[in-house]
Amino acid sequence: MAPRKTEKARPPQLRSLMTRQKLIDAAIEQLWESGYQKVTIAAISARAGVTHGAHLHHFGTREDLLAASVDALFQRSVAEYEVRMAELPRDMPARADAALEQLRLVAMGRIFEVVGELLLAARTNPELGTRMHHYAISQRALQKRMYELAFGAAALQDKRILLLLDGTFAIFLRGLATLKKTRSAVELEEAWLAWKTTALPVLLAHLAEIDAAEPQSVQI
């Protein structure tokens, strides 16, 4: 049996990638547990088990690291969403309902609670604001990727469908996520079901109009 490689025995490029990933994972956990104001490079480095200056080599500033971390977390969420989408029903009414539920899982998950912390801080931190602007561009592309996986590229050419999906994911669900600490789970569920009851028939009607609802047309 081959001996297990130590950290130093690994190729430099692999060690660099591992260090970067450790910093990203630690930054996400610190943001989640402590909030932006209490996150320090020292705490992130200690949690990641790397030297205090390691972040300088990989990210430069704390703001660079934090913005890169939420981008990585959103990409991870979309990758998990993509796996789940492969298991959705092919019948469009059932598929559309299930797809909206999958969007809810992403929007109501950890990612946007962490993003909310950074967006709030960005109001008074111009450097962080710049980083979050770049993150927003990346996020927008990933959101469209999620919609495309569910309904096909042709469906997104219809602005009504794109606006409805954006309204559901980026406005309603993300807004609902901000209420998690002040509303009960029952209240949140009721609000979501009321929205979906209204939005789902409209979405299905638009999809039927453009005949773009076949799952096999999805470009992956």
Image (cartoon, helix red, strand yellow):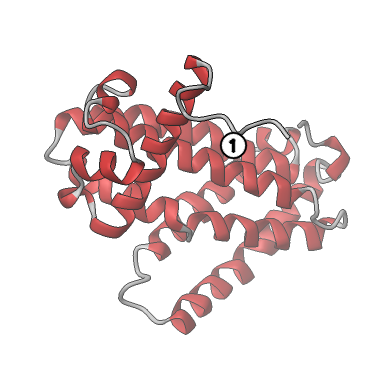
Q: Is residue 21 left or right of residue 84?
A: left
Could you say which quadrant of the image residue 217 lies in?
top right
User: From the viewer's perspective, is residue 31 above or below residue 183?
Assistant: above
Residue 44 picture location, percent across and down: 27, 42
Decide if residue 56 is in sight here: yes
Could you tell me which quadrant the C terminus lies in?
A: top right
Which residue is located at x 55 percent, y 35 percent?
Answer: 142
Residue at 79% x, 46% y is 209
User: Please, which residue is most extreme toward the left here?
Assistant: 124
For the residue pair 146 and 160, the one nearer the viewer reads as 146
Residue that badge 1 annotates: 144
Q: Specify whether 118 is left or right of 126.
A: right
Q: In the image, 172: left or right of 43?
A: right
- Indicate the position of residue 212 as horizontal and vertical percent values: 81, 41
Query: Label 1 amino acid?
Result: Lys
Quarter of the image for the N terminus: give it: top right
- Between 27 and 172, the residue placed more toward the observer is 27
Q: Residues within 10 Å of mark 1 (few under 14, many from 20)?
A: some
User: Is residue 163 visible in the rendered structure shown here?
Assistant: no
Q: Is residue 137 above or below residue 109?
A: above
Front one among 134 and 31? 31
Count the labels in the image: 1
Residue sitting at x 30%, y 59%: 33
Please name the residue shown 46% across and 49% down the image. Answer: 170
Percent coordinates x, y for residue 24 in the rendering:
39, 37
**166 over 131 or under it: above or below:** below
Q: Nearer the viewer, residue 88 or 110?
A: 110
> x, y percentage for residue 108?
48, 61
SS under mark 1: helix
